[in-house]
């Protein structure tokens, strides 16, 4: 989809509408292509497609790239260094880059990486969860959330829970 | 340019300033309302419903903070004060309506026991609570509590499932002899339509991000438009008061200097009402060197502070959690622990606002696990959690106060305020009690504790930078107080203070309803005195 291909006419004046977000064709602006591919892998391992959408379908990699583009230098450095360390860690465990590993090798790496619970892993996990939670796709299809709009009544708890 | 003359100038358009403006203009006085910020437009200047991903780049590239549009994140003041000590906040929203634009609407009457430590009684304030609740359209349930009296309520909003479980826990503890109450929140948000009333709530849960349909009460959507209708109000937004001009002997206020987009102007008045909030009002009094023979301006600073405990109730797993939004997060309240019988371990009181509900933007970044297990946990915690957030009154002491920063000034050359906060033993003892009580309630209802502070220490306590009070304390003795029981300055006969600076002893309850009731009462007194020629 080309940018600026939609026009709105208001009061006789044509205004360019903001281009609709196209995550499928988005090119990263902060991450290198290799880093972006690694972020895509790692976030999908953390929150996989498993009957409900995972991080990839939710567009998490776009969110993280955009947030970091506008973050301060120390946050950006933390991510660059953290991803490089994760890439080295994955390659030494699997004997190959993470992108070339099979599903079992990838999951095995994530299990160890999550278990080590480094400072960067916690930062990575936090931002991935944040990106996922703000995604319309995840909200509707994983969380089953139908809020953020107007309803006439709030009925509250209607069930008899045993305590 | 000719000096503009008014009967009353009101400075600050938050909850106190808004109601004062309405009462004075309705009484026939010529009023100018001076507000340093702009009038904001719902939907255009803030829009919490907007899609986060679609707007992410536009927001962040323009320097906005946070990923969701809210009136607070998009318009709050920044770098406007100096904090000293234990991380004090100073919430300040320079816009028409002030922080009534972003408040949650919690409207709780102080009770007769609270007012025993004030120079006025509950009975004197009660009629103003009633009038305020009707104008604000406060909803709530009638609970019959001794020290949080019922008001003039529209129909209340029910608990969510998690909060119902907390009530079960509280009822079990009460049967064992514990003093506590669990009740629904009371908020200035209409739940039924009435002639001349505001739009009924549509339960989108974005109250604190800015109500786009003007259902929640704000100064900007209720008292100020009513005041404008009288024809007696001159509304001056984008206008900053820079100086209070005193008479030659310094005995009376003659008027104020302001700066707006055209430059410096002078406004004269018979009476001045300051309602700039409990940090800005003392700041301006100190900067002008007035109204402080008692030495108490900026002193007796108090606020609410707290910790948060999160529990989980597996019993409510599998419920319909598709729309828990309601009237924003906190629908209920745990209170009444120490009204009649104070705690032997600390002075003061606390309440715990309680919440629950699924909202994917309320993040659980520490949810355990990875992969499918993490996804399940994120959903499960969202569905089954309760959030218990302490609101306890700080112990008032010489270690908590507002003064002027000697080194930093704002763009008008006025020294910035400095807020000093140091938690003390009493504050820690109160927080320990809250931690114990919250855990007991959760466990009594057979829930589990998901998260709590690592320890009770100053670094784990969180101040509410929007609940400051007390810095121009009300009292009968001019040596120990700043204003009298009518909120009139002891020192300056035509100066009134109509914000929460005037508060005396501060209980656990949110300040705004009492701020509005006291300001209403003070504005009526001002009007009477002006009519009698006593101003």
Image: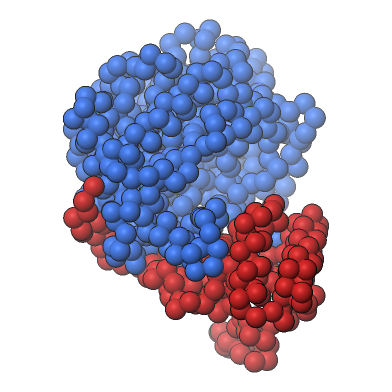
Whether residue B256 appears in this view of the structure is no
Image quadrant for the N terminus of chain B? top right
Is residue B266 placed above or below B178 in the rendered structure? Answer: below
Is residue B485 placed above or below B186 in the rendered structure? Answer: above
Residue at 27%, 46% in the rendered image = B165
Nearest the camera: B413 or B113?
B113
Residue at 45%, 60% in the rendered image = B377
Nearest the camera: B14 or B423?
B423
> What is the count of numbered marks?
0
Residue B464 horizontal/vertical position (percent): 52, 36
Q: Tell me the colour scheme of the image.
A: by chain
Residue B512 horizontal/vertical position (percent): 41, 37
Residue B284 horizontal/vertical position (percent): 63, 29
Q: Colour of chain A?
A: red
On the picture, is A97 further left or further right than B402? right
Whether residue B320 appears in this view of the structure is yes
Nearest the camera: B487 or B270?
B487
Chain identifier of the blue chain: B
Residue A88 horizontal/vertical position (percent): 79, 67
Residue at 22%, 30% in the rendered image = B174
Residue at 37%, 31% in the rendered image = B437
Nearest the camera: B212 or B384?
B384
> Quadrant location of residue B531?
top left
On the picture, is B56 further left or further right than B372? right
């Amino acid at each position: 989809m080309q940018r600026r291909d939609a026009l709105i006419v208001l009061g006789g004046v044509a205004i360019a509408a903001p281009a609709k977000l196209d995550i499928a064709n988005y090119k990263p602006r902060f991450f290198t292509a290799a880093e972006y591919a690694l972020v895509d892998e790692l976030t999908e391992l953390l929150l996989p497609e498993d009957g409900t959408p995972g991080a990839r379908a939710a567009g998490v990699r776009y969110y993280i790239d955009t947030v970091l583009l506008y973050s301060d230098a120390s946050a950006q450095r933390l991510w660059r260094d953290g991803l490089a360390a994760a890439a080295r860690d994955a390659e030494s465990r699997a004997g190959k880059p993470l992108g070339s590993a099979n599903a079992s090798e990838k999951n095995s790496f994530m299990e160890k990486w999550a278990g080590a619970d480094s400072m960067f892993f916690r930062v990575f996990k936090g931002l991935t969860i944040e990106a996922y939670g703000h995604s319309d796709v995840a909200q509707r299809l994983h969380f089953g959330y139908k809020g953020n709009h107007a309803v006439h009544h709030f009925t509250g708890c209607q069930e008899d829970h045993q305590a | 340019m000719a000096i503009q003359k008014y009967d009353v100038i009101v400075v600050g358009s938050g909850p106190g300033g808004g109601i004062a403006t309405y009462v004075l203009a309705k009484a026939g006085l010529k009023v100018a309302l001076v507000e340093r910020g702009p009038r904001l437009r719902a939907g255009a200047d803030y829009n919490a419903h907007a899609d986060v991903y679609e707007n992410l780049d536009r927001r962040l590239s323009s320097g906005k903070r946070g990923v969701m549009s809210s009136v607070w994140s998009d318009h709050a003041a920044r770098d406007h004060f100096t904090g000293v000590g234990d991380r004090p906040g100073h919430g300040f929203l320079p816009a028409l309506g002030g922080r009534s634009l972003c408040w949650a609407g919690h409207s709780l009457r102080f009770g007769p026991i609270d007012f025993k430590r004030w120079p006025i009684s509950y009975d004197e304030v009660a009629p103003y609570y009633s009038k305020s609740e009707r104008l604000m359209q406060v909803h709530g349930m009638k609970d019959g509590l001794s020290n949080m009296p019922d008001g003039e309520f529209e129909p209340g909003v029910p608990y969510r499932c998690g909060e119902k479980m907390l009530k079960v826990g509280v009822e079990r503890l009460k049967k064992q002899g514990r003093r506590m109450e669990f009740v629904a929140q009371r908020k200035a948000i209409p739940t039924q339509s009435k002639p001349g009333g505001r739009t009924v709530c549509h339960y989108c849960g974005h109250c604190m991000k800015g109500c786009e349909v003007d259902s929640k009460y704000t100064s900007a959507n209720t008292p100020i438009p009513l005041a404008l209708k009288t024809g007696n109000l001159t509304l001056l937004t984008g206008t900053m008061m820079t100086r209070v001009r005193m008479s030659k002997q310094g005995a009376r206020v003659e008027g104020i200097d302001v700066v707006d987009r055209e430059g410096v102007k002078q406004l004269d008045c018979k009476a001045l009402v300051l309602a700039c909030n409990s940090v800005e009002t003392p700041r301006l009094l100190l900067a002008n060197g007035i109204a402080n023979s008692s030495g108490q301006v900026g002193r007796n600073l108090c606020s609410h502070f707290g910790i948060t405990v999160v529990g989980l109730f597996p019993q409510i797993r599998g419920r319909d959690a598709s729309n828990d939004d309601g009237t924003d997060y906190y629908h209920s309240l745990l209170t009444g622990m120490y009204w009649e019988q104070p705690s032997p371990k600390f002075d003061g009181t606390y309440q715990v606002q309680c919440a629950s509900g699924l909202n994917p933007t309320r993040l659980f970044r520490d949810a355990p696990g990875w992969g499918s297990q993490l996804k399940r946990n994120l959903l499960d915690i969202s569905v089954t959690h309760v959030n218990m957030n302490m609101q306890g009154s700080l112990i008032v002491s010489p270690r908590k106060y507002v003064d002027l920063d000697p080194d930093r000034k704002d763009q008008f050359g006025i020294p910035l305020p400095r807020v000093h906060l140091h938690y003390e033993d009493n504050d820690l003892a109160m927080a320990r009690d809250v931690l114990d009580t919250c855990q007991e309630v959760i466990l009594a209802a057979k829930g589990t504790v998901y998260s709590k502070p690592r320890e009770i220490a100053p670094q784990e306590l969180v101040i509410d930078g929007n609940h400051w009070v007390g810095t121009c304390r009300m009292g009968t003795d001019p040596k120990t107080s700043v204003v009298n029981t009518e909120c009139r300055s002891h020192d300056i006969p035509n100066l009134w203070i109509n914000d929460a600076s005037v508060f005396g002893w501060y209980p656990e309850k949110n300040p705004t309803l009492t701020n509005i009731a006291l300001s209403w009462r003070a504005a009526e007194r001002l009007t009477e005195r002006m009519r009698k020629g006593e101003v």
